[in-house]
Image (cartoon, rainbow, N blue to C red):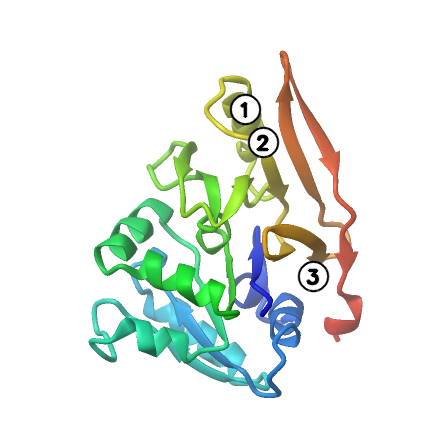
């Protein structure tokens, strides 16, 4: 059974409600005709606006949407609840707070089991970097830092690579200071698709969005552009 993670640096239903190309791409990777999709909005402090945006968009798609709240839990058995889903979508927000709460409820272990059982894991921003060993986060106000994440995927990831002026230079500084491991920088609109731990595709909802692998090499950072496929056929 394939283990799949689709990690997006930005975009998706919240940033681009008129362009659900990334969301449709994720649904297309599931073998079921009408997959069940569970949204987990922990990182946004379970924002009602964010959650409603999810349902507004996903109710227009060929799927069965649901949402998991950790403050108003639908069941005491979170593992059974999530392992019944086909896709688990993690929203953006504060990664540090999200992971702390997940660990308190053993959601980190449940998500690992879900991945092992072939449930597609996906998400944007916090829902992108959480799968890697490290992520570049703005969880601390006015400060970009490297933080340890779940480690399902090797290396590090920085989302919003083109969307915030300090993202790229801060990532480079962390690489040069040995605070951040080699990994990936993702523009808004780009998602990396992993099967197992192998990167098999980079796709984008925007024609000019890019993705890079990065690593420190002595006193400089080497960025290598990845081949990104524009999902033009899914934007109309």
Label 1, label 2: how many angstroms apart (C-alpha)?
A: 7 Å
Residue position marked by numbered label 1 in the rendering: 175
Secondary element type, mark 1: helix
Q: Dots 1 and 2: beta carbons under 8 Å?
A: yes
- When the figure is inspected, residue 89 is found, relative to residue 169, above or below; the finding is below
Label 3, label 2: how many angstroms apart (C-alpha)?
A: 25 Å
Specify which label sits upstream in the sequence, 3 or 2.
Answer: 2
Is 135 placed left or right of 221 in the picture?
left
Label 1, label 3: how many angstroms apart (C-alpha)?
A: 28 Å
Closer to the eye: label 1 or 3 = 1
Is 111 placed left or right of 199 in the picture?
left
Residue position marked by numbered label 2 in the rendering: 182
For label 1, the crowd category at 10 Å Cα-Cα, with few meaning under 14, some 14 to 19 and many 20 or more, is many
* Residue depicted at 35% across the width and 64% down the height: 110
Q: Report x, y in % for residue 193.
A: 64, 57
> In what quadrant of the picture does the N terminus appear?
bottom right
Question: Farthest residue in the front direction?
Answer: 1
Closer to the eye: label 3 or 2 = 2
Residue position marked by numbered label 3 in the rendering: 205
Specify which label sits upstream in the sequence, 1 or 2.
Answer: 1
Q: Dots 3 and 2: beta carbons under 8 Å?
A: no
Specify which label sits upstream in the sequence, 1 or 3.
Answer: 1
Secondary element type, mark 3: loop
* Residue depicted at 63% across the width and 12% down the height: 219
Secondary element type, mark 2: loop
Q: Report x, y in % for residue 80.
A: 32, 77
């Amino acid at each position: 059974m394939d283990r799949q993670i689709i990690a997006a640096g930005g975009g998706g239903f919240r940033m681009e409600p008129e362009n659900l190309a990334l969301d449709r791409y994720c649904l297309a990777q599931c073998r079921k005709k009408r997959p069940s999709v569970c949204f987990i909005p922990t990182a946004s402090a379970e924002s009602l606006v964010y959650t409603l945006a999810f349902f507004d968009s996903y109710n227009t798609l060929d799927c069965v949407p649901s949402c998991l709240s950790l403050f108003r839990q639908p069941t005491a058995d979170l593992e059974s609840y999530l392992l019944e889903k086909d896709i688990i979508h993690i929203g953006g927000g504060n990664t540090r707070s999200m992971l702390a709460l997940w660990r308190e409820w053993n959601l980190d272990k449940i998500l690992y089991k879900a991945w092992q059982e072939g449930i597609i894991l996906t998400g944007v921003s916090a829902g992108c970097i959480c799968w890697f060993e490290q992520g570049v986060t703005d969880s601390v106000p006015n400060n970009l830092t490297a933080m340890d994440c779940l480690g399902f995927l090797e290396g590090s990831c920085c989302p919003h690579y083109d969307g915030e002026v300090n993202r790229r230079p801060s990532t480079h500084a962390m690489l040069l200071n040995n605070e951040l491991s080699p990994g990936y920088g993702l523009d808004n609109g780009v998602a990396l698709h992993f099967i197992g731990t192998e990167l098999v595709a980079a796709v984008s909802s925007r024609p000019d969005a890019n993705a890079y692998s990065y690593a420190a090499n002595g006193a400089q950072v080497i960025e290598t552009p990845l081949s990104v496929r524009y999902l033009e056929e899914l934007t109309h």
